[in-house]
Structures are given as C-alpha cells and as structure tokens.
Amino acid sequence: MRSLIVGNWKMNGLSGALAEAASIDTLAGELPGVEVGLAPPFTLLSPMAAMVHHLSVGGQDCHEASHGAHTGRISAAMLAESGARFVILGHSECRAEGDDDARVRAKVDAALGAGLSVILCVGETARQREAGEAKSAVVGQLAAALPQGEGSAERLTIAYEPVWAIGAGQTPAQDEVEAMHRAIRSSLVAHYGEAGRLVRILYGGSVSASNVEALVANAMVNGVLVGGASLTAESFGAILRSIAGSGRAD
Ligand code: PGA
C-alpha cells in the first residue's frame, strides 16, 4: 500500500503559512508514490483546500454533535464543507483535555457520517509503558473506538503515537514500534476480518528527516503522522523525499 504522510500543524499557522502548504503541495505532485495530507488549524482549512491539487486537507478534531450549543466547537459537516477530506481524532492532546474513549468513538461516528475519513490516534503514556501496560492500553483504546458500520474500515487510518514520544525528540526502538503495529494489525483483523489488513497504520511522535527512513523501513509501518517537522516545506519536504526515495513508495 502507498505510504501516507500527514502533517498535523496543531495550533500553528497564520495565512502566511499557506505559502508553505503551496510548496508542500508542489512537492507532493512530484512524488506520486506517496500520499500526503495536511491538517492545518480550522482557520486555514478553506483557503488551503481551495489552493492545493496534490495533497488532501483535513481537520485536527471535531465535535461529536452535528450542530447546537457548543461554543467554540466545529462539527464534522463543517469540516467537510470547508474542504476537509479527513479528520484526526483521539490525539493525545485532545485526550489530555478531556476526550475519553466514548467521546472519541462518538467523534469517529460523526466524522464517518459526514463523509470524512478518520485518522484515529492511539498511544500509551510513559507511566503505562513503565508499568508494562503499553500494549493493553493501545488495544483497549482501539477496542473502544473502532467503528462498526459497513465500509468504515476503508475510511480509517490508525496512528500509533506513544504519548511520551510526541514533541519529545525521542522515539521507541524499532522493534517496539513493530511489536505495537503488529498488535494493532491483529486488533484490526479481529474487528474487520480481511478488510482490517488494508487499514494503514502510521507511526507518530518526533518523526523527523533523520529518523523517518529507519521508521518506514519496517513493512509494518504504513506512513507517518508528523507534528513539529511538518510546519515548513523544508522539513516536511525532507521527510516526503526520504520516504519517496526509500523504496516504501509504490
Ligand atoms: P511531533 O507531533 O511530530 O511534534 O512529535 C506528532 C503528533 O502529535 O502528531
């Protein structure tokens, strides 16, 4: 399957940052072997979606309700109308601000219902890892959030993001990444049958141009979710080129 590389801009980017997105889009057009997505802040979704040709634009979160009295929130349909094709859900920064498993699941259903694809983030905390509970934590998050409906596997991507690795400049050892991706794949196949083999599983957490090649060298890793290093065309472009040149693009 084609590697998917998604940039999560988090709460970064004023309109001047659209120039970075334009350069990333141009590069994505030159690297057809990889699939590229960018999740800018809500305020840049519409202009970015109107501008790009080769990458898909997505949201970083949505509310589970379709509309109503939820000050400051954005519905999945609003994202879709703004040009989003996907939404990142269950990111650890949203879980830290109150999203529990049930809410993540409700958001997944809302997003799929609005026609979006979903990148569902799962990952253990440092404490869970130290207690030897990393795998059970991740498998538990999956079991709680995987959607049931027919065709939902086709619009689903999983991002394994160990919470302790995000923004920390450190990544798990390659065999740890492989073991977790294997466990996630098993859960997907148990849940969806053969369709579970086609769901991409990304790695996220301190991905950079210097470590990405080693990360995607593992056939269990179907792409990456990138935070800090996705903010400029220079650093994100280096990651795209590295994956495109690694033999993992097809
Ligand atoms: P990072 O963020 O690449 O800056 O560690 C990844 C993420 O939070 O998705």
Image (tube, helix red, strand yellow):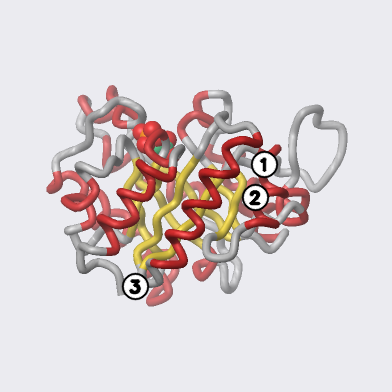
Q: Residue at x 64, y 50 (%)?
A: 48
**Does the closest atom of ligand 1 sit within 8 Å of the Cβ of label 3?**
no
Of residues 28 and 213, the one drawn nearer to the viewer in this rendering: 28
Q: Secondary structure at mark 1?
A: helix
Q: Quadrant of the rendered structure where residue 243 is? A: bottom left
Query: Residue 160: image x %, image y %?
Result: 35, 46
| Residue corresponding to mark 2 | 48
Of residues 3 and 232, the one drawn nearer to the viewer in this rendering: 232
Disc 3 to disc 1, C-alpha distance: 29 Å
| Residue corresponding to mark 3 | 1
For badge 2, the amino acid type reads Met
Instruction: Tell whether label 2 touches label 1 (CB within 8 Å).
Output: yes
Regarding residue 186, the answer to whether it shows in the image is no
| Residue corresponding to mark 1 | 44
For badge 1, the amino acid type reads Leu
Please state which of the two labelled residues, at mark 3 or mark 1, is closer to the viewer.
Answer: 1
Residue placed furthest toward the right: 68
Query: Residue 4: image x %, image y %?
Result: 40, 60
Residue 109 as seen in the image, left or right of residue 96: right
Q: Residue at x 44, y 51 (%)?
A: 6
Query: Residue 32: image x %, image y %?
Result: 40, 71
Pointer 2: residues within 10 angstroms few (<14), some, or many (20+)? many
Disc 1 to disc 2, C-alpha distance: 6 Å
Q: Secondary structure at mark 3?
A: loop
Q: Residue at x 59, y 73 (%)?
A: 150
Regarding residue 24, the answer to whether it shows in the image is yes
Residue 212 as seen in the image, left or right of residue 97: left
Residue 2 as seen in the image, left or right of residue 97: left
Q: Quadrant of the rendered structure where residue 158 is? A: bottom left
Residue 212 as seen in the image, left or right of residue 21: left
Task: Choose the circle earlier in sequence order: 3 or 2.
Answer: 3
